[in-house]
Image (cartoon, rainbow, N blue to C red):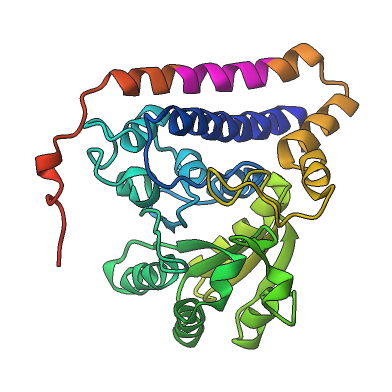
């Protein structure tokens, strides 16, 4: 991988980190209200995966999806505006942090129901068989969602019908506040997909290029009618499960170890060892932070959503 592409990876991850840190500030100041879940430490997965998705492909994420939206091409100002309940948000300020979507960018939304993106993605993949779109659907969920019946059922249906779905499990070790090791006997979550006849891999989720290689192969397989794939991307979040989580459940020294190997630190270390200048490395971060500062400032100046429109665009 040439240095130019590595710097592009670094900038893409810094954009997500800077967005999430600005969201954190706005949540603490009260400008953003409600539950917010950050992606800090997991940035390599959306950056590496989104690079392989095409315009027609459909992405379904968890409530930890701000970074996925940004990686898919959703403008940062529109994301901030949505989280800040502004009319200029991607859903007019109605979706907030946990429910926004931007289908015009192939981002079909977050979901506060654990694992609920899986059946939605399978539906999108099934529709692709008849609408001529050539669509591949990707669903992203955490390790805890592997214990949801809807995820297992979705995987089985996708396998049985050979649907073009990519299941991506962001295994960050913790299912909310509980270690996944305390919830399953077999820590290899990809083995469940293998048992259903779905090709599955376990990868280092802290390396963009490793993620891209796995997702790229899965997209090609789906394109050629070979059915679903499963990717278990092992990573670590370096923030709490939610804002306000004091993380008392972490053993001593674990967070520090995770922070020393998170994707931005790791890639910066590699670029520095390859001869990249400190100025060039600092400039990547500066540009990302400047963008998010400006985007959030503009979003804050936009008009608030009229609460009388809360029932618009709802279907029952």
Q: Residue at x 53, y 43 (%)?
A: 243
Residue 274 appears anywhere in the view: no
Q: Residue at x 53, y 48 (%)?
A: 242
Q: Nearer the viewer, residue 96 or 178?
A: 178
Q: Where is residue 253 shown, x and y percent of the image?
A: 84, 47
> What residue span does the magenta drawing correspond to?
283-293
Q: Where is residue 291 shown, x and y percent of the image?
A: 49, 20
Q: Nearer the viewer, residue 106 or 134?
A: 106
Quarter in which the N terminus is drawn:
top right
Quarter in which the C terminus is drawn:
bottom left
Q: Is residue 240 magenta?
A: no
Q: Where is residue 4 shown, x and y percent of the image?
A: 71, 27
Q: Residue at x 82, y 28 (%)?
A: 271
In the displayed image of the protein, which residue is found farthest to the left? 308
257 sits to left or right of 18: right
In the displayed image of the protein, which residue is found farthest to the top? 279
Does 131 sit above or below residue 271?
below
**In the picture, residue 29 is in which quadrant?**
top left
**Majority SS type along the magenta span:** helix
Q: Nearer the viewer, residue 141 or 3?
A: 141
Does 259 sit above or below residue 228?
above
Q: Where is residue 311 shown, x and y percent of the image?
A: 12, 52
Does 12 sit above or below residue 231?
above
Q: Residue at x 73, y 47 (%)?
A: 207
Tally the numbered discs: 0
**In the picture, residue 262 is in which quadrant?**
top right
Q: Is residue 285 magenta?
A: yes
């Amino acid at each position: 991988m040439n240095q130019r592409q590595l710097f592009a990876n670094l900038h893409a991850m810094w954009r997500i980190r800077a967005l999430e840190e600005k969201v954190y500030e706005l949540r603490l100041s009260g400008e953003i209200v409600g539950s917010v879940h950050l992606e800090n430490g997991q940035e390599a997965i959306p950056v590496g995966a989104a690079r392989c998705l095409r315009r027609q492909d459909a992405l379904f994420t968890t409530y930890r999806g701000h970074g996925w939206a940004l990686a898919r091409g959703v403008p940062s100002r529109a994301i901030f505006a949505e989280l800040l309940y502004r009319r200029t948000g991607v859903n007019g300020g109605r979706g907030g942090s946990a429910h926004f979507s931007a289908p015009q960018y192939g981002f079909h939304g977050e979901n506060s129901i654990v694992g609920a993106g899986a059946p939605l993605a399978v539906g999108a993949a099934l529709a692709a068989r008849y609408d001529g779109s050539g669509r591949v659907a990707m669903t992203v969920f955490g390790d805890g969602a592997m214990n949801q019946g809807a995820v297992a059922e979705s995987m089985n249906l996708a396998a049985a019908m050979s649907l073009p779905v990519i299941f991506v499990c962001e295994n960050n070790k913790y299912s909310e506040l509980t270690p996944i090791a305390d919830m399953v006997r077999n820590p290899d979550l990809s083995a469940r997909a293998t048992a259903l006849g779905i090709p599955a891999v376990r990868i280092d989720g802290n390396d963009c290029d490793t993620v891209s290689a796995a997702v790229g192969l899965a997209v090609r397989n789906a394109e050629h009618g070979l059915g679903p794939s499963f990717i278990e991307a092992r990573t670590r979040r370096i923030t709490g499960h939610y804002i306000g989580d004091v993380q008392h459940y972490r053993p001593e020294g674990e967070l520090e170890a995770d922070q020393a190997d998170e994707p931005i630190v790791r890639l910066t270390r590699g670029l520095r060892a390859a001869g990249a200048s400190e100025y060039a490395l600092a400039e990547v971060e500066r540009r990302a932070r400047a963008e998010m500062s400006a985007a959030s400032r503009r979003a804050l100046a936009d008009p608030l959503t009229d609460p009388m429109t809360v029932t618009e665009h709802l279907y029952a």
